[in-house]
Image: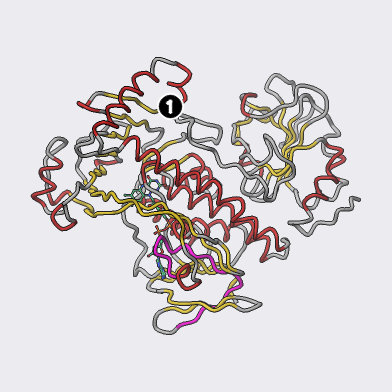
Amino acid sequence: MREVVVVGAGPTGLTLANLLAQQGVSVTVLERAGSACSEPRAVALADESLRTLHLLGLVPALAPNLVWDSAAHYFGLGGRRLATTRPGHGRLGFPRKNLFDQPDLVEVLVKGALDRGVEIRHGAHVTGLRQDRDGVTVLTEGGAEWRCRYLVACDGGTSTVRDRLGIGMSGSSQAERWIVLDMIHDPHDERASLFYCDPGRPAVVVPGVRGRCRYEFMLLPGENDEEVLTDAFLTGLLARFRPFDPAHVRRRAVYAAHRLVARQWRRERVFLAGDAAHMMPPFAGQGLNSGIRDARNLAWKLAAATGGRANAALLDSYERERRPHSEQMVRLSAALGRIVMTTSRRRALARDLAFGLLHLVPPIRSYVTGMRFFPEPQVSGGCVVGTGAPVGQQLPAPTVTDAAGTGHRLDELLGIGWAVVALEPRHDPATFTALDRSALAPLAASRVSVLPRDRIPRDCPATRVFADTDAMLPFPANGEPLLLLVRPDRYICAAFRPGDADRVAGRLTHYLPISDQGE
Ligand SMILES: Cc1cc2nc3c(=O)[nH]c(=O)nc-3n(C[C@H](O)[C@H](O)[C@H](O)COP(=O)(O)OP(=O)(O)OC[C@H]3O[C@@H](n4cnc5c(N)ncnc54)[C@H](O)[C@@H]3O)c2cc1C
């Protein structure tokens, strides 16, 4: 019996398959399409997703196809520039917004998965499933059956698995429809997306690498899908940007944006992830990024469950931890669409005036231009101990330098499992002594201690490093080190003093089968 079957070789399913295989789990991916090609859809890749790809060693393969560190220009009535957002670098080790092409990502993920021994079955159209106490039987067209311990439905917005389980969606499908036109040999070469917030016909232009460019135009009332996709119609739409040449079209399509979240993300041994669990308008560029977050959250929990290292509550924590942020992203995407892509002239006028006023207040201006209105995912109420920063946040991903002067990404020193990062105000040889004797010791095999950059090393183990900048990590001002227990998905599970390790272990026994007795 396979440990996990993933339905759908889209970005979510393939990321999950890579992460599971990296953690030693046997995975089969069932994909109904005959080959590994995805349509050009998502164009914005977040730093968090790049961090996940980095942990899988896949960034170098994708890097040449990325427009790194991009900005966005917004134009209001009369083509006047309303704002430029430039999120720049955050705390996760990569630029916060990057432009890319979904088929490039899928290709990199397929190669990564195959290299890790994942079995990918193309032409395997899942039509049904049965569950029993020990596992799941998946049925594909033609009558084949696949048996596994856990099934993850990453089969997109029209998920067959979700449908067979009878799980409904809550929310709504947006009335507006959009033309998506992907072109090649395009003259746009600015490292920025362009949002034309003209109520007459909102439009978006997103340049890509090697002359690729995405154009999106809102359909107006009375226009129909066939008409707007004709050469004649597209020639007119594109005229203000470039000449239309049918030979330069990669894809033309009409899509309707949805705001939908599945009512339940787990039914016994079956989980929903990615668009199968949530769908959002593309204005915030978060659909695919949310799917990668799901994969990241679920992978280590399934790996723990298949390896006998999880209590039942750990798998339940997937929905509990991921749902709130996904719902926030659905709301944010819809709100951005309403503000930026309104077709009401009156609202557009009010918006343009408001933007003009906001620009006069520097803190608000930098809040908007730095895109700090994007809520960072935060785990609360799941597999974490305590509340309040930094617990439940993602561990920042700074670069650090070892005593020999060699630079590293902190992520690379932590490995792929649980880890403890000690933030030491000054060198303390006993930092890990109490931890080593506690019930937490077997869980977190990987240990790294980080010192502020102004300290002189007393010894040189590879696991003692210096922060290149102190600002990213919550160093205690003085006294005892602060230990951060970091989950495999790089969320901070607990922040505690060395003597409290057994207390933390005790609080985790609900999720993990660890003894609450230390040595
Ligand atoms: C115009 C547009 C722009 C977008 N821009 C962005 C953006 O900038 N950033 C962003 O983050 N997101 C964006 N998105 C959203 C993003 O494309 C999706 O969220 C993402 O593709 C979801 O990935 P997924 O793997 O969950 O699902 P999908 O990509 O839909 O993949 C599902 C896979 O499952 C397979 N499948 C389906 N049913 C079955 C079955 N019964 N049996 C076997 N296989 C099956 C399908 O063939 C497919 O390969 C955009 C979407 C659109 C339409």
Left of 517 or right of it: where is 196? left
Left of 382 or right of it: where is 247? left
Name the residue located 36 percent from the left edge and 42 percent from the top edge: 283
**Residue 226 x, y percent position in the rendering:** 15, 58
Visible in this render: residue 112?
no
Q: Is residue 28 above or below residue 464?
A: below
Q: Nearer the viewer, residue 117 or 480?
A: 480
Q: For the residue with label 1, is its CB less than 8 Å from the closest atom of ligand 1?
A: no
- The stretch in magenta equals 144-160
Left of 455 or right of it: where is 135? left
Visible in this render: residue 505?
yes
Q: Residues within 10 Å of mark 1 (few under 14, many from 20)?
A: many
Residue 136 lies within the magenta run:
no
**Residue 270 x, y percent position in the rendering:** 56, 68
Left of 62 or right of it: where is 496? right
Name the residue located 48 percent from the left edge and 18 percent from the top edge: 363
Q: Secondary structure at mark 1?
A: helix
Q: Nearer the viewer, residue 213 or 53?
A: 213
Tag 1: amino acid: Val
Q: Which quadrant of the figure shows ligand 1?
A: bottom left
Q: Is residue 186 above or below residue 20?
A: above
Question: Label 1 belongs to which residue?
Answer: 368
